[in-house]
Image (spheres, rainbow, N blue to C red):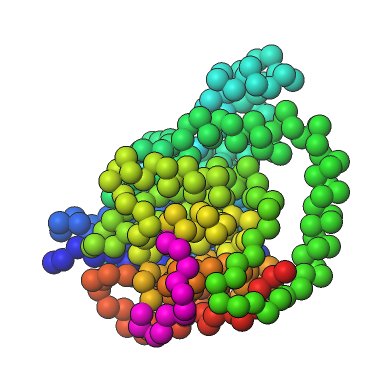
């Protein structure tokens, strides 16, 4: 049988978007099951049922990857550990590096004290660690260059990750200093989002804000694999910084950019996670005119809840289509993108999103 993959983005249908991704692939006759994030806690049962129904009722999951601490990514994974034998868990735990980090946190004088505080700051990772330890599952660090089955970790590097831990608003160094400012900034950001206006724009015009995503999102594990001749990039909630670091690393594994066939749009289609420059590196520069049906160059997938009014942003959808992308989203439905994969009864092709004639001002 030819190599194949089926990449499933489950519908995480709450008022907020989340990521629950299941992937089955086969290379030279050997099949792997790879889970990336698990959505919210209520998503866990759905993820388990999906794997059993569509992946041949397996008892073993080869790899589980938690991209970062957020509850819309971590919540459902505990259920996966309860229902399957998991061979490997890949996630970054900041307290593992407390000894290296200690000199950068003036408030702490002991490694134990810093470890305790970091576990409190990243509770979803700590909870999943407890489950993995109980189940005797080995936990690996997904730093840049690591291999997870057919996937390579593109970012973060260890040095970048440690910097992000220090920069994070969750960690003990910054929280007391900037908490008030952040509260004020968040208040005005919410007000601005509520009154956002849309501007009719010409083909090729792109509007991204200067402010970037959080340090916590930048901690997201970015994974790349080429399976069945298709280049796949999974991004979690990573931002511009992580995507740039990943692009800088690409030549070292023989990945020539631009040239991705399946691109997960980070953070549910947020404008703060991408930019024209970053997308040019990964997906190519904008085309002179909109491609016709059947002329798209790659597929981009956005995980966004139907009830989430903030995602995906029109500017992001436009930017993907500018580069020849076919944009699909799982709003209200589970979706699959695949190559050479077994047919599924009742599953049909996903209609791509139309090109927005306007975008956020």
Query: Residue 188, image x and y in percent?
Result: 84, 56
Q: Nearer the viewer, residue 163 or 127?
A: 163
Magenta segment range?
Answer: 283-295
Task: Residue at the far front: name it.
Answer: 288
Question: Residue at left 86%, top 41%?
Answer: 180
Horizontal relation, residue 347 to residue 161: left or right? left
Q: Quadrant of the C terminus?
A: bottom right
Question: Residue at left 51%, top 30%?
Answer: 159
Q: Residue 44, relative to residue 136: is it above or below? A: below
Q: Is residue 298 magenta?
A: no
Query: Is the stretch drawn in magenta largely helix, strand or loop?
Result: loop
Query: Residue 38, image x and y in percent?
Result: 50, 57
Answer whether residue 182 is visible to the viewer in this image.
Answer: yes
Q: Is residue 293 magenta?
A: yes
Horizontal relation, residue 87 to residue 217: left or right? left
Answer whether residue 85 is visible to the viewer in this image.
Answer: no
Q: Residue 345, relative to residue 231: is it above or below? A: below
Number of numbered discs visible in the structure rendering? 0
Q: Residue 272, relative to residue 126: is it above or below? A: below
Query: Residue 350, image x and y in percent?
Result: 43, 80
Question: Residue at left 70%, top 38%?
Answer: 170
Question: Residue at left 80%, top 68%?
Answer: 194
Q: Nearer the viewer, residue 293 or 97?
A: 293
Question: Residue 298 lies in what quarter of the image?
Answer: bottom left
Question: Residue 181 lies in what quarter of the image?
Answer: top right
Question: Residue 331 lies in what quarter of the image?
Answer: bottom right
Q: Nearer the viewer, residue 331 or 297?
A: 297
Horizontal relation, residue 6 to residue 156: left or right? left
Horizontal relation, residue 193 to residue 156: left or right? right
Query: Residue 286, image x and y in percent?
Result: 47, 68
Q: Quadrant of the N terminus?
A: bottom left
């Amino acid at each position: 049988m030819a190599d194949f993959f089926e990449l499933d983005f489950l519908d995480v249908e709450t008022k907020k978007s989340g990521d629950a991704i299941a992937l089955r692939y086969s290379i030279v006759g050997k099949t792997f099951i790879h889970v990336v994030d698990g959505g919210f806690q209520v998503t866990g049962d759905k993820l388990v049922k999906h794997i059993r129904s569509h992946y041949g009722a397996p008892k073993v999951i080869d790899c589980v990857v938690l991209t970062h601490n957020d509850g819309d990514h971590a919540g459902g994974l505990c259920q996966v550990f309860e229902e399957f034998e998991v061979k490997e868990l890949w996630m970054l735990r900041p307290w593992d590096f407390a000894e290296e980090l200690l000199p950068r946190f003036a408030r702490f004088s002991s490694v134990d004290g810093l470890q305790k505080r970091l576990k409190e700051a990243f509770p979803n990772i700590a909870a999943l660690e407890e489950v993995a330890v109980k189940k005797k599952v080995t936990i690996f660090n997904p730093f840049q260059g690591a291999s997870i089955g057919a996937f390579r970790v593109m970012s973060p590097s260890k040095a970048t990750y440690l910097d992000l831990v220090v920069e994070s608003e969750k960690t003990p160094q910054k929280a007391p200093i900037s908490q008030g400012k952040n509260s004020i900034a968040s208040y005005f950001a919410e007000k601005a989002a509520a009154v956002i206006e849309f501007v009719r724009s010409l083909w090729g015009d792109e509007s991204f804000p200067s402010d970037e995503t959080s340090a916590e999102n930048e901690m997201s594990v970015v994974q790349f694999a080429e399976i069945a001749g298709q280049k796949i990039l999974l991004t979690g909630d990573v931002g511009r910084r992580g995507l740039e670091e990943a692009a800088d690393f690409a030549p070292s594994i023989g990945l020539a950019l631009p040239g991705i066939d399946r691109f997960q749009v980070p953070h549910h289609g947020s404008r703060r996670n991408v930019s024209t420059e970053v997308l040019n590196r990964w997906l190519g520069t904008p085309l002179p005119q909109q491609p016709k049906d059947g002329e798209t160059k790659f597929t981009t997938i956005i995980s966004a809840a139907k009830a989430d009014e903030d995602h995906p942003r029109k500017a992001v959808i436009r930017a993907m289509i500018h580069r020849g992308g076919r944009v699909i989203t799982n709003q209200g439905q589970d979706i699959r993108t695949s190559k050479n994969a077994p047919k599924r009864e009742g599953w049909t092709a996903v209609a791509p999103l139309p090109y927005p004639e306007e975008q956020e001002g």
